[in-house]
């Protein structure tokens, strides 16, 4: 990875503890605050739920703060859906949040049963109704996110650590490279963009098999072994018994292939619509990151040059699609070179075998400017004797990744 800041990194580790990574959504009309899970013994102290008055035919969407502890959004919504006996479609939210951490965000629930809602309790999920409103929350209905992050295991003297953090803050105020974060590429397996590349090639079978079988040393032994066995045997009946139940997406694809041999497109369509487009989008994001890296390597960096297509006055890079417009001059040469190096043309992003993953393309700014950067302190790390910690906070616009900022501060490739 090419870094856009010149300051020395501080190293360290993030997300050692859930409370080390706090995310609070900046909504269109306010902020969703973390309240419960920073308290002592919070897992055993559910907040009583009291639904406000004001429900009507006009105002049928209940706006709530949803605070969660080491849980992803979809898991929380499925759990509430079962408890309230409501369709998953009756829940709305503005954006995904990290699983490993403590996060708070807004959701809406369409006409819930108030008695059931007030009985709901969870050790890892806190629900706080705010008001009834007309509008359902949709993806993108937010301004950004506020992060409070503790970096641990730092091998620097306190004086040097403070110096490096302050130097980074000074550089970061001018902007850092707006890379897509590692979450975009599929968590510990980092396979999402590779699957997307196969789909753009038109290789549906290869993409589905990559999704099912690509292993990772960081996965648990049972699922890693099940993936390897399926790759070697192509025995979907056996795989249906070996894949653990919690891997419901993989199991859905496998069950389809047990019934309809070689219908890999049909198997892929067993995934929810909200997930199907992620694979090609992840591949577009991977190429976007490559373009930024090439700009940095070439010495152009993040500054505006002749031929750049600007967004809000800043240079952008292409998210390749079949209707994409490339930049001109040196910036355009880099974009064209990255695409050619992958062996593709723009027209390939119109995927005939899976039309629903096709993409017209777009552009995204390459400069990310963290706001409200605050240095909250340093000290001895009680969980890593002899090492230190640093605590910082900052706000990011929607679509930006905290790990992008942290990578520049820590100068550490794999966060």
Image (cartoon, helix red, strand yellow):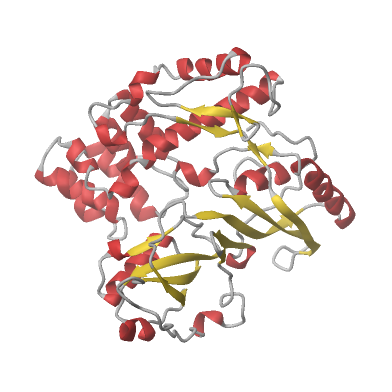
Residue lying farthest to the right in this orientation: 159
Where residue 198 appears, x then y in whole percent?
34, 29
> In the image, is 369 to the left or to the right of 376?
left
Where residue 223 appears, x then y in whole percent?
34, 52
> In the image, is 24 to the left or to the right of 206?
right
> In the image, is 41 to the left or to the right of 250?
right
Q: Residue at x 31, y 83 (%)?
A: 116
Q: Residue at x 46, y 31 (%)?
A: 362
Q: Residue at x 44, y 61 (%)?
A: 72
Q: Residue at x 41, y 37 (%)?
A: 281
Residue 76 appears anywhere in the view: yes
Location of residue 372 by image quarter: bottom right
Query: Where, quadrant-wise, is the N terminus in this rendering?
Result: top right
Could you say which is closer to the camera, residue 135 or residue 155? 135
Where residue 287 appears, x then y in whole percent?
50, 28
Residue 122 drawn above or below residue 327 = below
Residue 314 drawn above or below residue 306 = below
Residue 387 appears anywhere in the view: no
> In the image, is 409 to the left or to the right of 398?
right
Location of residue 42 by image quarter: bottom right
Residue lying farthest to the front in this orientation: 58
Could you say which is closer to the camera, residue 240 or residue 96? 96
Number of marks in the rendered image: 0
Where residue 408 appears, x then y in whole percent?
70, 42
Residue 119 drawn above or below residue 4 = below
Residue lying farthest to the left in this orientation: 259
């Amino acid at each position: 990875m090419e870094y856009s800041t010149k300051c020395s990194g501080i190293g360290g580790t993030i997300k050692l503890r859930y409370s080390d990574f706090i995310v609070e959504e900046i909504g269109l009309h306010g902020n969703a605050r973390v309240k419960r899970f920073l308290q002592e013994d919070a897992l055993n102290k559910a907040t009583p739920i009291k639904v406000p008055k004001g429900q009507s035919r006009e105002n049928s969407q209940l706006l709530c703060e949803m605070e969660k502890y080491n849980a992803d959004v979809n898991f929380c919504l499925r759990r509430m859906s079962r408890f309230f006996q409501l369709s998953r479609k009756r829940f709305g939210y503005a954006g995904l949040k990290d699983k490993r951490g403590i996060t708070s965000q807004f959701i809406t629930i369409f006409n819930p049963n108030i008695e059931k809602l007030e009985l709901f309790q969870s050790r890892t999920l806190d629900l706080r109704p705010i008001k009834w409103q007309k509008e359902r929350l949709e993806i993108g209905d937010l301004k950004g996110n506020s992060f409070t992050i503790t970096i641990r295991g730092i091998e620097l003297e306190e004086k040097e650590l403070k110096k490096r953090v302050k130097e980074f803050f000074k550089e970061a105020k001018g902007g850092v490279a707006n890379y897509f974060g590692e979450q975009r590429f599929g968590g510990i397996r980092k396979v999402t963009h590779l699957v997307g590349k196969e789909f753009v090639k038109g290789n549906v079978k290869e993409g589905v098999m990559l999704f099912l079988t690509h292993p990772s040393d960081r996965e648990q032994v049972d699922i890693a072994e099940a993936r390897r066995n399926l790759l070697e045997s192509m025995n979907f009946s056996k795989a249906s018994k070996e894949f653990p139940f919690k891997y419901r997406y993989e199991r859905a694809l496998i069950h389809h292939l047990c019934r309809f041999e070689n219908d890999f497109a049909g198997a892929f369509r067993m995934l929810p619509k909200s997930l199907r487009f992620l694979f090609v989008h992840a591949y577009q994001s991977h190429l976007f990151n490559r373009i930024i890296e090439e700009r940095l390597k070439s010495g152009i960096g993040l500054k505006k040059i002749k031929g750049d297509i600007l967004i809000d006055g800043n240079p952008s890079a292409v998210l390749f699609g079949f209707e994409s417009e490339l930049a001109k001059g040196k910036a355009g040469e880099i974009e064209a070179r990255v695409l050619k190096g992958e062996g593709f043309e723009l027209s390939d992003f119109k995927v005939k075998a899976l039309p629903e993953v096709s993409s017209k393309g777009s552009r995204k700014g390459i400069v990310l400017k963290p706001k409200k950067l605050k240095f909250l302190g340093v000290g001895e790390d009680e969980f890593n004797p002899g090492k230190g910690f640093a605590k910082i906070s900052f706000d990011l616009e929607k679509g930006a990744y905290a790990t992008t900022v942290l990578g520049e501060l820590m100068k550490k490739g794999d966060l």
